[in-house]
Structures are given as C-alpha cells and as structure tokens.
Image (cartoon, rainbow, N blue to C red):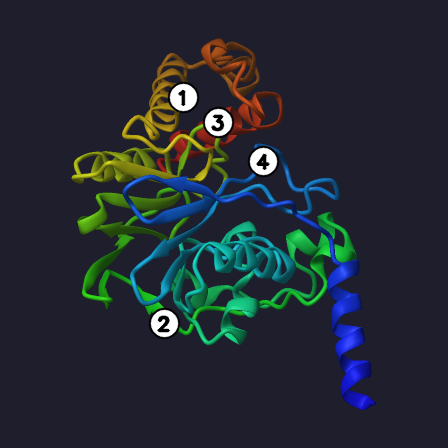
Amino acid sequence: MKLQLLSFLFINSLLLAFDYKLQPKELMGANTHCFFGHSEVMDKHNNGNISNSCFVDMGSAYLVIDSGSTYTYASQAYAKMRAIKDLPIAYVINTHIHDDHWLGNGYFKEQGAKIIGADGFKELPIETATRMQKRISAEAYKGTEQIHPELYVSDKKVLDIGGKKVEIIHVNHKAHTASDLYVYIPSKKIVFVGDIVFNDRIPSIRDGSLQGWIDALDEVRVLDTRYIVGGHGSLVDKSALDMTYNYLTQLQAEVSEHLENGVDIAEILNIVTMLAFKDVKLYDVMHRQNVEIAYRMLEWGDE
C-alpha cells in the first residue's frame, strides 16, 4: 500500500510539472542533439528556457553540454533523449556561471553524472534565491538546487569517452565572463562555446570584456570544425559566430572613436545606435545598456 501511494505521488508530481515542450534537433553526422532555447529574457512564460543544452552520443554514454535552467528542464530533456537512445550520462559540462546554463545539474547528479565546470564556480556563492528563481514560476523551479561542479577546469582538460577525445579549454582571460569554457571534439568536428556565441539575439556584455571576447572568438574561428554551437541561437554552421563578432567589433570601434573625440556618455548613448542590428532580437532590451557598459570599459581600460 505504501509503495502504491509513493508511486501515485511521484506520477502526480510529474503530471503537475511545467511542460517545456522540448524538441531535440539533430546535428547530422555529429551524433548530437540540441535543445535550442527561446531568444527572450527569462520569465514565467518561458520559465528559463532561453539557452541551449546539447547531448552528444559518445557511444556508451551521453556527454551533456550545459544542463539547462531547472531540474524539471533537465529531466524532460533527458527523457526526450532516452526515447532516441537510452544511454547513461557520463559528464555534464557547465560552460560558465550564468544560471540559465547550469541549474539542471541536480537532476543529472542524481543520474550519476560527473559535473565539470570552469574554475569561476569556486567563487560563486550559493544564493538565497537565484536570478532564475525570482523570475520564473515556482512550479517550473520545483526541485531545483544550486549544485556546483565537482571537477574544475582552469586551463585545459582532456576526457576520453568511448575512445573519443574531448578537449575542455578554459579561456584564460575575461570574455563573456571572467571564466568561460569551450568544448571541442575533434573527431566530430564540433565545438560548444557557451555564451561566447549568440547568433539570434543581442549579447549581454555586462560581465565580460570586449577585446577579450573578440580574442576568444578568433581562437574558436581557427578550429577545424563543421559545427559551432553557441549558448543562444540555433545557427550552428561555421558562420554561427559572425553576428556576435560583428556586433562586438563595431561596438568597440564606435564607442572608442567617440571617446577619443571627447564625446560624453549621454551623447554616445544616442549616437551609437548600430541600426544594422536593430532587427536582431532583444536589441531594444540590450543594446543601449551595452553601449553604456562599453563606454565604462573603454574609459577605464577595463579590457
């Protein structure tokens, strides 16, 4: 009787959970499926489904790149993948510390996966309430815990999974954040770069460095790849990094020019409109903020 009650409660909790309606998209020839997030800010409509999470079939197990926004998200993503091929999870790699990319860790830890992340997680405090928790529904956030990686990468780490080499490279300078990873699988010609690449929405530069980010993109560009998978956006071919690169280089050039000419920030905010990007999603939300942040970075040489 007790077992039947527990089963009933478990099934009932699943039925009550928010349905992310996740649909895996296959990257042909790479044995990889990705769940591409919405190009939106996190809210109670999307419940944090704004970033990308990918599953790489390594033969005997999956490698997961970014665990997603919640415990519920992670559990639903894995259920979709098990329907395609029922494999265990060997590792989950968190590309950086922004919480839309790693709050699904708790679910995968329960499945026995090892969690790997950038060394920036060492300094990341456990919050009373995460940014995600404050902005999405309690229903979707249910069961989510702040589970940090157990293994940290500060330079480079190489895994062997099913006889295939996986290179985890730490960007050794500030780029999108002060501690970013990208994951390169040479045999599959695929690289997962987290939020070093946005390709269907304007990026946020608030935690990064313009020049450092541009340098990281140059580093990724020379890799032998067929697929470049960013943290936001569904474009995954070799042109995937172009929008981010073009946006950052133009922002840096225009703000620098006006600074050198003695234009003050109030004027720069109105001048540096970069209208070539006005139809990119979140332009109205992010661009003016980015101009102000770029001004402060370049004014004080915080690059």
Which quadrant: the N terminus? bottom right
Which mark identifies residue 38?
4
Mark sitting earlier along the chain (3/1): 3
Q: Can residue 301 be seen from the camera position used here?
A: yes
Horizontal side of 238 relative to 282 (left or right) equals left
Dot 4 or dot 2: first in sequence order is 4
In the picture provided, is 135 more to the left or to the right than 183?
right
Q: Badge 1: how crowded within 10 Å, few (<14), some, or many (20+)?
A: many
Secondary element at tag 3: loop
Mark toward the viewer: 3 or 1:
3
Numbered circle sitting on residue 292 = none
Of the residues under marks 4 and 1, which one precedes in the sequence? Answer: 4
- Give the residue at mark 2: 151
- Residue 43 falls left or right of residue 33: right
Q: Nearer the viewer, residue 89 or 152?
A: 89
Residue appearing at x 29%, y 45% in the figure = 30
Q: Secondary structure at mark 1?
A: helix
Query: Which residue in the protein does label 1 denote?
Result: 251
Task: Give how far apart the Cα atoms at labels 3 and 1 are.
Answer: 17 Å
Residue picked out by circle 3: 200
Label 4 close to label 2 by CB (< 8 Å): no
Q: In the image shown, does 199 or 75 lie closer to the viewer?
A: 75
Residue at image position (24%, 58%) is 166
Disc 3 to disc 2, C-alpha distance? 31 Å
Q: Counting residues from the N terminus, which is met first, the one under dot 3 or under dot 4?
A: 4
Q: Amino acid at mark 3?
A: Asp
Residue neighbourhood size for the residue with mark 3, other residues' Cα within 10 Å, grouped as few (<14), some (14–19), many (≥20): some
**Quarter of the C terminus within the rendering:** top left
- The Cα atoms of the two marked residues, 2 and 1, are separated by 36 Å
Residue 42 image point, x, y percent: 65, 42
- Say what amino acid the circle numbered 1 marks: Leu
Helix, strand or loop at mark 2: strand
